[in-house]
Image (spheres, helix red, strand yellow):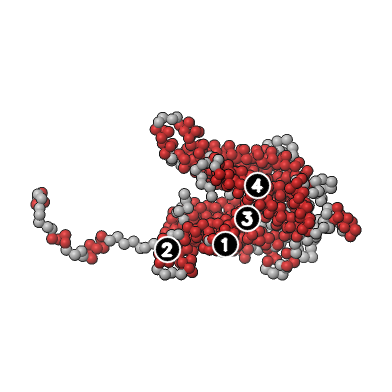
Amino acid sequence: MNTKTLSYILKRIGLALLTIWIVITITFFVMHAVPGGPFLGEKAISEAAKAALEAKYGMDKPLFQQYITYLKDIVTKFDFGPSIKQRGRNVIDIIVSGMKTSAKLGLAAAGIALVCGTVLGSVAALRRNKFIDRVIMVITTAFVSMPSFIMGTFLLLMFTVQIMLFPANGASKGGLVLPIITLSLSPMANITRLTRSSMLDVLGQDYIRTAKAKGVSSTKIIFFHALKNALIPVVTYCGPMIAYIVTGSLVVEQIFAVPGIGRAFVSSITDRDYTLIMGTTIVLAILIVVMNLVSDILYKVIDPRITLE
Amino acid sequence: MANKYFNMQLDVDAFLPASAEDKAYMVQMRPSTTFFRDGVKRFVKNKIALISLIIIALIVVSCIVIPFFWPYSYDEMLGVKLGRPVDSSYNNLAPFEYGETEQERIAAGEKVFPHLFGTDSQGRDYFIRIVYGARISLAVGFFASIIVLIIGMTVGAISGYCGGKVDLVIMRIVDIIYSLPDMLLIILLASALKQTKLDQIIQGTVLEKIGANIISLFVVFGVLYWVSMSRLIRGQILSLREQEYVLAAQAAGARGKWIIMKHLMPNCISVVIISTALQIPNAIFTESYLSFLGLGVNAPMPSLGSLASDALNGISSYPYRLIIPAVVISLIVLSLNLLGDGLRDAFDPKLNG
């Protein structure tokens, strides 16, 4: 790794930190700009009780001071404060407990998407313009333009209502199968298309012809010469894929009643649980920004041909 | 056999001036083609894109025309008549079924307009709700893209043409906005703006019907989504600025405004149109997603996303209520995507690497 690469990496990390700080700031001020405040619920509360509550959550201090405290708590302790609606629970606890399920869901979906996507993409490229290639391309085109909530509801309809193969409730055993499939389909379709086009590009290169000419077996060519290079562009898609899975999981967890972080986020919006909204937004945003960073850096590091800005 | 041997004698006929007939035979004149006509020719050859265009046109036309003559409206609860108890026989009708009073009218020999897709749980004609939903989705997609186009194009053109420090600052801001997780911020802003007094501000204006949520969606689009457009425009302007024909124009004494209007803009326009076309399905996607989460259009007004989300409750009894809006969204998004791809292939051959 030369100094140029290193300075690029440092620059990207700096940008990522800046982005995270901006997200936290936007989240904080947007949530505080909302009129009404968190304690204006269904029941009217007395002035004294309201003042006491505000003092308890530190909301009687000036806004800027609250912001500094909030920022400091996040940076030093990763503490997002207590949840306003769920009594006695900290936001970070709710996030961590939701994260366990969501991480399982997201990682499985990402894994399936990567494996199936590269296999299907390679098959399509190797059988270019044959029947199987056409079939794969038509199906992936359809998957790419189908919103995740549509895919999810269709799967729900097919497998829980019509065939009763899987439980509709994501919390029960085997309940994660359908949400995982739902989340993996669209990234899988994208990876398939990406792999196909980069594989076609690689297969037309001179070194493939050279390998063929010197009598390397075709399996070896496909796996060692072609696929290794064809997969490089797929790395760049990993960041957006994580972003898609994170946002997709918001609705998918809602549809299948999966007790994950996405569901906590959506219900915190309807409950107007401001601290929870802020906490989840920030955690998910950090996740997305970090994944983007990692996939960008990885891309530049594994392919030395790519020139750095 | 005269030509069998090498002959120094010239054939005088070969040197005669060509007659008009000869000229017509030699010169194959074709009508000169413009860039636009050339693109259209290529576009028409692309069957998939053409079919997508036809589907989009059909959907758009029916969204505009059908509400004018359809006997039911999107918020009319058919069972609720003034001065009479609510007639629940109108709720949850299957396609082509009729409510009780309608059946009486049919028995009396009257003609009653059928409910093509039945009615929903509140006795509203489902077909017209789908039409309105598609109308909202398309309108949101279109206007959001226009907003993105205007902001992105202005910023991109300024950044690209000015260069230097201006460019540096703008591009840093673009970089940061670009790396913000857009969907999360959209949800955040939409849920926050929903609580504001926006509803009262827009009361009484045309905007009231659209609702605060959709306006906040536009705001968010305006704030976040212009960056990729401005990057694209800036890149175009930067590369076009260095082209020889710009230098030639400068040498010929053209001024900055003339160069931008006559040379740079026309060459950008295809890229702009294509990315706008691809932006529309993106916006529709986002709108349906937000509506599905309950952050979309205001209540009686339907959108395809909210229709799908409402249908989730009765999924086992009325699956078609979910399938219809789902198919319509997918159809719109898919055809718009394919149309955008087709436009790109036809009008910007350079882009297809």
Image marks 2 and 3: residues in contact by CB distance under 8 Å? no
The answer to which quarter of the image holds residue A32 is bottom right
Report crowding for label 2: few under 14, some 14 to 19, many 20 or more residues within 10 A (C-alpha).
Answer: some
**Among numbered discs 3 and 1, the one appearing first in the sequence:** 1
State the residue position of label 3: B177
Q: Amino acid at mark 1?
A: Val
Q: Amino acid at mark 2?
A: Leu
Residues at marks 2 and 3, CA–CA distance in whole angstroms = 34 Å
Give the percent coordinates (x, y) of residue B106: 68, 59
Residues at marks 2 and 1, CA–CA distance in whole angstroms = 23 Å
State the residue position of label 4: A288
On the rendered image, what quadrant is the N terminus of chain A found in? top right
Task: Report helix, strand or loop for mark 2.
Answer: helix
Give the residue at x 69% y 52%. A21
Image mark 2: chain? B
Give the percent coordinates (x, y) of residue B233: 53, 59
Horizontally, residue A14 falls left or right of residue A138, namely: right
Q: Amino acid at mark 4?
A: Ile
Q: Is label 2 or label 3 in front?
A: 2
Give the percent coordinates (x, y) of residue A138: 53, 45
State the residue position of label 2: B247
Give the percent coordinates (x, y) of residue A50: 87, 57
State the residue position of label 1: B166
Q: Amino acid at mark 3?
A: Ile
The answer to which quarter of the image holds residue B21 is bottom left
Report crowding for label 1: few under 14, some 14 to 19, many 20 or more residues within 10 A (C-alpha).
Answer: few
Give the residue at x 83% y 54%. A58
